[in-house]
Image (tube, grey):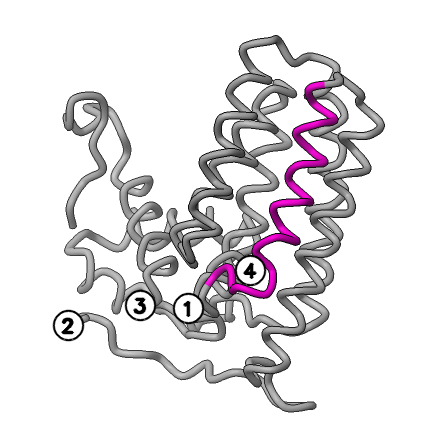
Amino acid sequence: MKAPTGPAGIPPLNEPVYLRVKRAILADLVAGAFLPGMHLTIDTLTSRYGVSHMPIREALRQLEGEGILISLAHRGFKIESVTEDYIRNIYDIRVGIESLLAHRAAELATDDDIRDIREMHEALCVMIRSGGGVPAALENVKFHKRLYSIARNPEAELILEGRTRVVRTVGDGLGGYTPEVFEIVIAEHEKMVEAMERKDPKAARDAVFDHVTAARDRLLRKMALSHRFPPDGATEDTTETKLASG
């Protein structure tokens, strides 16, 4: 397993192995090697990443705590299945935390912060309009992270990051932004940026609330049209998937 690198490409000297394993599992989830509903075992992951059981077990427990995995008694772990209720619940978490962070960000933003947000927004507009799809969606994540970092609440950001990875992965798997929503998303972001420029906490909070709620509805529509939800009463496949040679 290739270790993540720090500044100048140097791996962090004291980074525990379980953190590298956790990063690798998340990278495989984002890349689509692991899918919602998939059953993962410690033995399979040990073979895949070439490390002992102990760091695998700790990485899985951390991902369970972040809501990404579900523990199966004596049978390993399952990646959270993505149902309509699950998506709605995750977006309830998102809208609450992101609205709070936007409100606080508008209170604390410096002129440099606001200039960065405006520049990132303008660059993102170009990507979206050029049909960037998934790359634009990934750049959108960076835009939101930069905005929320202004609120200086890393604990809230950590909760947000852990609880949204699976849903983001599903959205990316559906192709990211599509032409019919380009101008809609840009207009929603513009309201957020303008609220920041006015340093208006209420307007920033409301703009983020509206944007995240609309994003939820867009994702639900795309999933329904793509038949991505399990049939009523059915569960997604939880049999072990052989990943060692993947």
Mark 1 and mark 3 lie on one chain; the one further toward the N terminus is 3
In front: mark 1 or mark 3? 3
> To which residue does mark 3 refer?
33
Task: Give the CA separation, mark 2 to mark 4.
Answer: 26 Å
Q: Is the residue under label 2 in contact with that under label 1 (CB below 8 Å)?
A: no
Which residues, given as a range, are shown in magenta?
Answer: 176-197
Q: Quadrant of residue 156?
A: top right
State the residue in front, 103 or 136: 136
The circle drawn on residue 245 is 2
Vertical placement of 25 versus 235: above or below?
A: above
In front: mark 1 or mark 4? 4
Q: Give the amino acid type for the residue marked by disc 4 in the picture.
A: Val
Task: Give the CA separation, mark 1 to mark 3.
Answer: 18 Å
Vertical placement of 225 versus 183: above or below?
A: below
Q: Position of residue 84 (x, y in %)?
A: 69, 72
Vertical placement of 245 versus 215: above or below?
A: below
> To which residue does mark 1 refer?
76
Q: Is the residue under label 3 in contact with that under label 4 (CB below 8 Å)?
A: no
Task: Give the CA separation, mark 4 to mark 3.
Answer: 15 Å
Mark 2 and mark 4 lie on one chain; the one further toward the N terminus is 4
Farthest residue to the right: give it: 202
Q: Does dot 3 land on a helix, a strand or a loop?
A: loop
Mark 1 and mark 2 lie on one chain; the one further toward the N terminus is 1
Q: Give the amino acid type for the residue marked by disc 2 in the picture.
A: Ser
Q: Position of residue 153 (x, y in %)?
A: 63, 23
